[in-house]
Amino acid sequence: MLFRSSDYPPYFGNEIVQTLDKRPVVFAGAFNGKHIDNMLLHAPSLRINAFEPSPSWSEKLKTKYQQIPNVTVQNILLWNEESELFFDEDSINGGLDARVIESPVSGNEIRIPANSIDNILSSEVGSIILDVEGSEQKVIWCCPAKIKLPLVLVLHFPETFRFLEPG
């Protein structure tokens, strides 16, 4: 089932979706798909590459979008290189505070494959949407081969933009 735009605030409302071009969208931190639903509501043919590191949410998304060929879902964490990282799914809160962590703390963390946009995708991207709880710099500055201007960059927390400096 796809959500109606009235079910959630228009995180990706018509004004943003209209700025997207025909190049694929990268959406890191796809969570439960509500924002993908809103994008598809306004642009049904938009090509969306969704990345969700939580195995449970990723499986739900794969099932939800299996009949929509322009949406692909991968259970991988976007990062700056090929790696395997510890990930706290935050299953107690339904994944709302899921995040990458340096080392296990509680024993509930899982190891997740990670890789860069350049290594995963074969085409250029027109938009990158990040809901990656502090890993924005790792994701953005590793994919120069795939980013061609103009680029639409949407951050879940706009205040993280100040951290997007090369390095």
Image (spheres, helix red, strand yellow):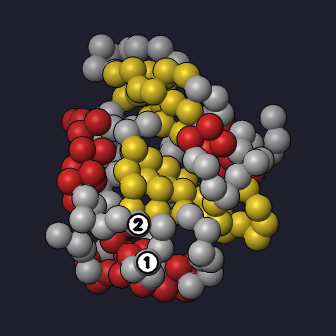
Q: Residue at x 81, y 35 (%)?
A: 167
For residue 29, the mark is: none
State the image coordinates of residue 31 (x, y, percent, origin top left).
35, 51
Q: Are marks 2 and 1 in contact (CB under 8 Å)?
A: yes
Judged from the image, the secondary structure of the residue bearing numbered disc 1 is loop
Whichever of callouts 2 and 1 sits on the residue coming sooner in the sequence is: 1
State the image coordinates of residue 20 (x, y, percent, origin top left).
60, 76
Give 153 or 91, whichever is nearer the viewer.
Answer: 153
The three-letter code of the residue at mark 2 reads Asn
Q: Which residue is mark 1?
A: 45
* Quadrant of the rendered image containing residue 64: bottom left
Q: Is residue 106 above or below residue 113?
A: above
Q: Is residue 2 visible?
A: yes
**Alpha-carbon distance for marks 2 and 1?**
7 Å
State the image coordinates of residue 11 (x, y, percent, origin top left).
45, 72
Q: Is residue 9 visible?
A: no
Q: Quadrant of the N terminus?
A: bottom left
Give 145 or 110, whichever is nearer the viewer.
Answer: 145
Q: Which residue is mark 2?
A: 70
Judged from the image, the secondary structure of the residue bearing numbered disc 2 is loop
State the image coordinates of residue 159 (x, y, percent, origin top left).
64, 56
Q: Is residue 100 above or below residue 5?
A: above
How many badges with numbers are in the image?
Answer: 2
